[in-house]
Image: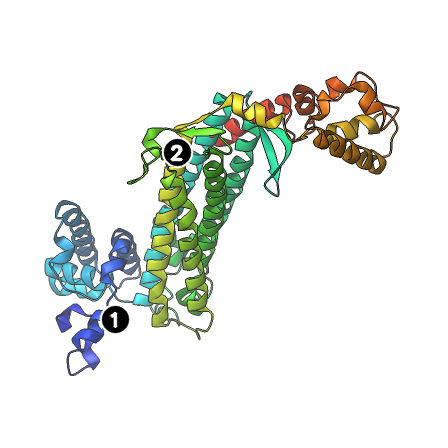
C-alpha cells in the first residue's frame, strides 16, 4: 500500500509492516459502504462550499469527480481491486485525487474517518432496514396466502408439545403474522434512531468549520443531527439494536421452521413440502428433507452470535472512537444478510407447502382436545369451574382406559360423573362447536379468524 493512499501517513517515517497492514485493513468488507460514503462525501462537499471552505469551481470539480467514481464502480467490476488501500475512505479519496488533483485533497477538511464511517454506516443500515422490512412483509404475505388457501382446515394446537385444543390452520398462520408484525414495528423504531447524522462531529470534539449540519442532514435524508460529538463517533447502539431486532426475527423464523419441520414428519403429517423446497438423501431413496427450514433454524444461532459479538465489543470501550469498532461491520452486515435471506426462503417454503386437511381434522378430534369444552359445558349448568375441571379429569381417565374419545361415551356413562349432563353435550363436544365458541377477540372461531385475516391484509397495505 502506497503511503500516499493512506489518510494518516505524514507523521510516520517508515512503511507499516505488511502483516500489520493486512490485519489493520478493512477494505475487504467496508467497501460495502462505498456508495453511502460517496453520497455523504458529496453532501459534505456542499457543506464546505456553503461554509466558504471551497469555491464553487472546487466544489463542482469534487462533486463531478465523486459522481464519476460512482459511475465507474458500477461499470468496472475490477475497479475495487486495482488499488491496494486500507479502507473504503482511502479508496474514494485516492480515486478522487486521481481525477481532480490537489483539489481532491480538500474534501476531508472538517471531518474525520470517525464521523465519516459512522455516517456511511448509518446510511447503509438505513437502506438495509428498509430491505428487511420489505422481506418481513413478504413473509407475512406468504403466511396470509397459506391461511386464506386453507381457511377451513383444522389442526391440533399444542402446549408442551402435547395436543391441547383444536385451532384453525389460519389461526396458526396468524400467530406468526403477529410475531413478524412486532418485528416490523421494531424495524421502524430502530430506523428512527439510525437516521441521525453524525457528520460534523469530526474525530470527537466537533468541526472548526462553519458547516451547516442541518443542511447536510436534510440533503442526505437524515431526520436530525447528533447532539454530542463524542457520543456520535463512538455510538454503535444502532448496530446493536438492529442486531437485536435481527435476532428476534430469527427467533420467530426458527420457531416457525421448527413447527413446519415437525408438521412435515410422518408422525404429524399435517403438511407436505413441495419438491422445489425439499431435498433427498444420498443413501435413503424415500427421504424428503426440510433442509431450508433446518438452515433457517440453524442460522438463528449465527445471528445471536453477532449480537453477542457487538455487545462484547462495545462493553469496555472508553470514549471516544477505538479501533475495536471496526469489528462492527462484518457482524452487522452478516446479520442483516442472514435475516434477509432467511425471510425470503421462509416465504418461498410457505408458498410451496400444502396442508393435509383430513390428517389435521383427524388429529384435532383425537386425544381429548374437547375436554375443556366439557368443563365449560358443566360451568354453563352451574358447576364451579374447579369442580368441573376435576370431574372432566375423571371422565378423561375413564375414557382413556377404554380407548374412546369423550364424544363416543354414552349419555349414561357421562351421567355417572355428573347429573347435569344432557344430550346437548354432544353438540358442545363437536369440533365445529369447539371452534365456534372461541369467539372473543383473538380467538380461533371461524368468524374471528375471518375478521383477523381481513384486518391483516389491510395492515400489509400500510
Q: Is residue 225 visible?
A: no
The structure residue drawn at horizontal position 40% and vertical position 58%, both measured from the top left corner, is 306
The structure residue drawn at horizontal position 48% and vertical position 28%, both measured from the top left corner, is 144
Residue under label 2 = 349
- Residue 162: quadrant of the picture: top right
Dot 1: what SS?
helix
The structure residue drawn at horizontal position 86% and vertical position 34%, both measured from the top left corner, is 384
The structure residue drawn at horizontal position 62% and vertical position 22%, both measured from the top left corner, is 446
Q: Position of residue 412 (x, y in %)?
A: 83, 20
Residue toward you, 220 or 426: 426
User: In the figure, is residue 121 to the left or right of 62?
Assistant: right
- Residue 196: quadrant of the picture: bottom left
Asked if 49 appears above or below 403 in the picture, the reply is: below
Residue toward you, 238 or 183: 183
User: In the figure, is residue 380 to the left or right of 111?
Assistant: right
Q: Give the CA distance from mark 1 to mark 2.
A: 42 Å
Image quadrant containing the N terminus: bottom left
Labels 1, 2: front one? 2
How has the structure been colored for display? Answer: rainbow
Asked if 258 appears above or below 173 in the picture, the reply is: below
Q: Residues within 10 Å of mark 1 (few under 14, many from 20)?
A: few
Q: Position of residue 386 (x, y in %)?
A: 83, 38
Q: Is residue 402 visible?
A: yes
Residue toward you, 191 or 19: 19
Q: Position of residue 255 (x, y in %)?
A: 50, 43
First of labels 1, 2 by sequence position: 1
Residue lying furthest bottom:
13
Q: Position of residue 235 (x, y in %)?
A: 43, 64
Q: Which mark is residue 205?
A: none
Q: Which mark is residue 24?
A: 1
Dot 2: what SS?
helix
Amino acid at each position: 500500500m502506497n503511503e500516499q493512499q493512506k489518510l494518516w501517513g505524514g507523521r510516520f517515517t517508515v512503511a507499516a509492516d505488511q502483516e500489520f497492514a493486512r490485519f489493520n485493513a478493512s477494505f475487504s468488507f467496508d467497501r460495502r459502504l462505498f456508495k453511502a460514503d460517496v453520497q455523504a462525501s458529496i453532501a459534505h462537499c456542499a457543506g464546505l462550499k456553503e461554509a466558504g471552505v471551497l469555491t464553487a469551481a472546487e466544489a463542482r470539480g469534487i462533486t463531478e469527480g465523486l459522481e464519476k467514481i460512482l459511475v465507474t464502480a458500477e461499470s468496472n467490476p475490477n475497479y475495487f481491486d486495482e488499488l491496494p488501500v486500507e479502507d473504503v475512505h482511502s479508496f474514494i479519496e485516492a480515486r478522487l485525487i486521481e481525477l481532480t488533483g490537489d483539489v481532491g485533497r480538500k474534501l476531508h477538511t472538517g471531518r474525520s474517518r470517525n464521523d465519516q464511517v459512522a455516517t456511511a454506516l448509518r446510511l447503509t443500515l438505513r437502506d438495509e432496514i428498509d430491505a428487511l422490512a420489505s422481506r418481513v412483509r413478504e413473509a407475512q404475505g406468504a403466511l396470509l396466502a397459506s391461511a386464506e388457501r386453507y381457511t377451513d382446515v383444522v389442526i391440533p394446537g399444542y402446549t408442551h408439545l402435547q395436543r391441547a385444543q383444536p385451532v384453525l390452520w389460519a389461526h396458526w398462520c396468524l400467530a406468526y403474522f403477529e410475531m413478524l408484525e412486532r418485528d416490523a414495528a421494531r424495524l421502524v423504531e430502530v430506523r428512527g434512531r439510525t437516521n441521525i447524522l453524525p457528520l460534523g462531529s469530526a474525530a470527537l470534539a466537533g468541526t472548526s468549520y462553519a458547516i451547516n449540519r442541518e443542511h447536510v442532514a436534510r440533503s442526505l435524508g437524515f431526520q436530525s443531527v447528533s447532539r454530542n460529538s463524542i457520543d456520535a463517533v463512538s455510538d454503535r447502539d444502532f448496530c446493536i439494536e438492529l442486531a437485536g431486532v435481527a435476532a428476534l426475527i430469527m427467533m420467530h423464523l426458527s420457531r416457525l421452521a421448527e413447527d413446519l419441520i415437525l408438521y412435515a414428519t410422518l408422525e404429524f403429517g399435517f403438511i407436505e413440502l413441495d419438491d422445489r423446497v425439499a431435498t433427498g438423501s444420498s443413501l435413503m431413496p424415500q427421504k424428503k428433507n426440510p433442509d431450508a427450514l433446518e438452515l433457517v433454524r440453524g442460522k438463528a444461532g449465527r445471528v445471536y452470535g453477532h449480537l453477542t459479538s457487538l455487545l462484547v465489543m462495545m462493553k469496555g470501550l472508553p470514549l471516544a472512537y477505538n479501533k475495536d469498532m471496526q469489528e462492527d461491520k462484518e457482524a452487522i452486515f452478516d446479520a442483516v444478510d442472514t435475516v434477509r435471506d432467511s425471510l425470503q426462503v421462509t416465504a418461498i417454503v410457505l408458498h410451496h407447502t400444502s396442508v393435509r386437511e383430513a390428517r389435521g381434522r383427524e388429529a384435532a378430534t383425537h386425544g381429548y382436545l374437547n375436554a375443556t369444552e366439557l368443563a365449560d359445558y358443566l360451568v354453563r349448568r352451574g358447576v364451579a369451574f374447579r369442580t368441573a375441571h376435576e370431574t372432566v379429569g375423571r371422565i378423561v381417565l375413564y375414557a382413556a382406559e377404554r380407548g374412546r374419545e369423550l364424544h363416543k361415551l354414552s349419555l349414561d356413562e357421562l351421567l355417572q360423573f355428573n347429573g347435569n349432563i344432557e344430550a346437548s353435550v354432544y353438540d358442545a363436544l363437536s369440533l365445529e362447536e369447539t371452534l365456534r365458541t372461541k369467539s372473543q377477540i383473538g380467538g380461533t372461531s371461524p368468524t374471528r379468524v375471518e375478521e383477523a385475516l381481513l384486518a391483516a391484509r389491510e395492515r400489509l397495505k400500510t
